Image (cartoon, coloured by chain):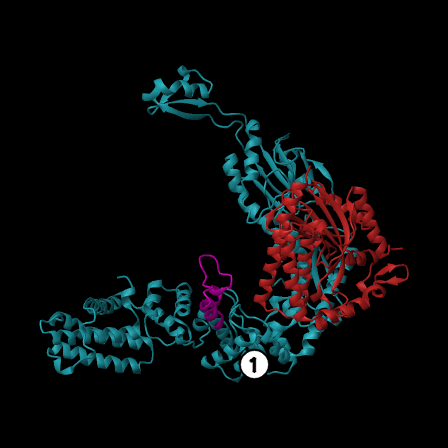
Amino acid sequence: MPKLLLEIGCEELPAWACEEGAAQLPELCERQLGRRPAELYAGPRRLAVVVDELEERTPDEWVKGPPEALAERAADGFARRHGVAVSDLEPRDGFLGVTVPGKPLAEVLPGRLEQLVRGFAFSRTMRWDEGGLRFPRPVRWICALLDSEPVEVPVAPSGRVSYGHRFTGSAVEVPSAGRYAETLREAGVEPDRAERFRRITEGLDALGEWSDPAGVLDEVVHLAESPVVLEGRFDERFLQLPERVIVTTMQSHQRYFALGGNRFGFVADGGDPDVVRAGNEAVLESRLDDASFTFERDVRKGIDRLAEELRSITFFADAGSFADKAERLVRLVDRLGGGDASREAARLAKADQASELVREFPDLEGAIGAEYARLAGYPEAVCAAIEEQYLPDAGGGPLPETEAGKVLAAADKIDTLTVSFGLGHKPTGSRDPFGLRRAAIGLARLAVDGGLRIPRDLLEPEVRDFVEERLEGLLDVPVEHVRAARASNAAELGEVAELARVLAALPDERLDRLHTVFTRANRIVAKAGDEALPEVRPELLQDEAEVAVARALAGFEASAAAAVDLDAVVAAAEELAQPLERFFEEVLVMAEDRELRRNRLRLLADVRDAVASRLGDLSQIPR
Amino acid sequence: MAPTYQQTIAALQSYWDDYGCVVMQPYHTEVGAGTFNPATFLRCLGPKPWKTAYVEPSLRPSDGRYGENPFRFQQFLQYQVVLKPAPADVLDLYFASLEHIGIDLVRHDVRLVEDNWEGPTLGAWGLGWEVWLDGMEVTQWTYFQQLGGMDVELVPAEITYGLDRLAMHVQGKRSVLDLEWAPGVTWADVYLENEREWSTYNFEVAPVDVLMRRFEEHEEECRTLLERRLPLPAYDMVLKCSHTFNLLDARGALSTTERAAYIARVRDLARRVAQLYLEVDAEAAP
């Protein structure tokens, strides 16, 4: 059965475009050719597929025409359009139609392959000539073969010609679809991403321990068609720079891999290794030289002077300067119960925003401020807190390890959320330019996983809702239990989480019972509107059952206040359930006597409020 | 003997001259990059083909370091080539130009690394690469997509060589200051004092209140020139606004919000100049 090669030859595609293209190719092949590719190649200068076991002809197709009932009026035109006689039309299911015979594959391929090439949906595309095709970078050739026959694809010069490595290879003729990869390999190109990835990681492994905190490997794999891993070294005098600065310099500009000490690994795409190594070493040294210049200027200035300069740096349009932010942070860490270290760290936390190094490498914020604080002789607790203030910086990323770090990290997030919401920058749908979701998740995790006591009243209502909604995704309990817990009067964020967990862990029959009585109390009170008395008048409690509820309520308040944990509170609530059940059986709440009725409603409302403030709104939990 | 700096420049001039470019001269008004020269920005608008090449001294006041940092300067030389429309073999032409100035593409590692360009003051953007030569960025490559807020009609390729870095590579020098400009004369001999004095001016002396006033005046004059339908002089006023803004920025006189507002003002003028340029150009067409 025929085998097809399609290679889309491009000017150097960005790595993301290689990945997007590779991800879409199987589906595109399926749509245009009815089969997914047997081989798929993606790299900077080509996206290619080999599809085998294709059918020689496209299947015959039955084209539905007019209903038989309308044959007299419409059959003639339909037949003419399809170049057949009316007598050749076949009836099927009440309609006339015609069988259009399939075509040889070679005949339909040019159109199908053009559709395929035009069918990609890349996140960013460009124009480059009048052809109208849009692609992430110009498409310069198409190499398409059906077995060994070239196929014309009318989007770019096409045929059996492909191109080898840009500098060491040349134009090559691919003899047949089955020999594509082999032909390219002979021309100095490794078309297979996985194979290039393997070569690079093996090469790096051979150099020793390597690190890639910025994740440049996924880009580097698409920056070379014939990757070679080389080792370089830089002058040891640069080792006095903080390691973070060295690694960031290597990675952000040069896509190098740190090997520890003054060694680095990098990936080249050819050239004389000694020449290429010397060139890259010189480039890195000049980058490090530049970083040293910047670093030394910052250090000469010192962190305290940098902190003073924050007054002229805007934190957020309409939200004052970074100096204003630092003052707010100092107040916030106080309210979060932070000690001297966190207060000092809050004052200096944003100083590095005034440094030249952070302007150059925004990724270094925090880390470099900590370094400058160390050089100025601040206690390690202060420096560590400055360093940890942006943690956790990813969903599952690590939390600050120090207490002061946790407090400062929480203060920073609370301030960012409060300011952003105050200015109306709420995240909408997938748009979250200020990273507020991440900040809110981070804050929730500081409470839940970090055990930090974060008073809920530190958060404005909107911010509080936004943060607590993140708890719904964070905790391994049904969202309804979180919603129930959020309605409680728990003073701290962590307590809300704890309550949600306790409610979720409660055996069904126990939860059922609480749910039934308290939801019923709630319903009755809610239905009566604002009829209830402002407070219970004991002299109006007549029935033994309602006296018992009043007594039990007082008991509940006392036990709940003395409870060592939430389980004890739940147990106390269960004590209250029993008299309440009796109350519902024996007492008519909606009594004829208006005062009696209002008093009973008050009593129920008090029960509802007492339980809700401790255990939340149980009616949120579906039963 | 490695070629001197001026020989490298001359080699590029002759290469693009031979290709058929109009070899222009640097523009007489301060620009932040060769893109701002009207030979690029204005000529890349509209339907007329255009090929040009020229040296552009580019001024970035904030990048000055008083000549103390051998990698940061407030002025550097670019070699700018524009081919409109971009021919299909434009990358090959570029690589051949590197060979022409003495770079062996097989011995070295040459790479095209994604780098997209955006010029907010010109309402312009394009997609392209930075070109790496053994890891050093030596050229900025852009296929313009929009200029003055309008889609380009013919897509131009803009090739901006970083002359200092290319010459460092060709001469095997580790510092721009040590480049041999002419026999026996270094880059430092030619420009070091210039860096010291202009850095002092840009960071310390440039009078903020005067600059702010000047910005308003240039802006006002640009509007007047637009009304008089004189897009070329009006464009010079855009350049003067842009440079004045860069100086204010270097003086640290602008908050983030103010910066954005100034950029928007320059962009608005650039957009109107671009539209007028096209109108006048169409009227003049035979």
Q: From what the image shows, is residue A304 above or below residue B202?
A: below
| Chain cyan in the figure, letter | A
Reply yes or no: does residue A249 show up in magenta: no
Nearest the eye: A337 or A601? A601
- Which residue is denoted by mark 1 in the rendering? A381
Nearest the eye: A32 or B15? B15
Classify residue A524 by image quadrant.
bottom left
Q: Where is residue B206 in the image (x, y as percent from the top left)?
A: 71, 70
Q: In which quarter of the image is the C terminus of chain B?
A: top right
Say which residue appears at 47% left-offset and 57% top-offset: A430
Classify residue A7 by image quadrant.
top right
Q: Position of residue A359 (x, y in %)?
A: 63, 68
Look at the numbered disc 1 and give the secondary structure of its residue.
Answer: helix
Which amino acid type is shown beneath numbered disc 1?
A: Ala
Q: What stretch is highlighted in magenta?
A: A415-442
A298 with respect to A74 (left or right)? right
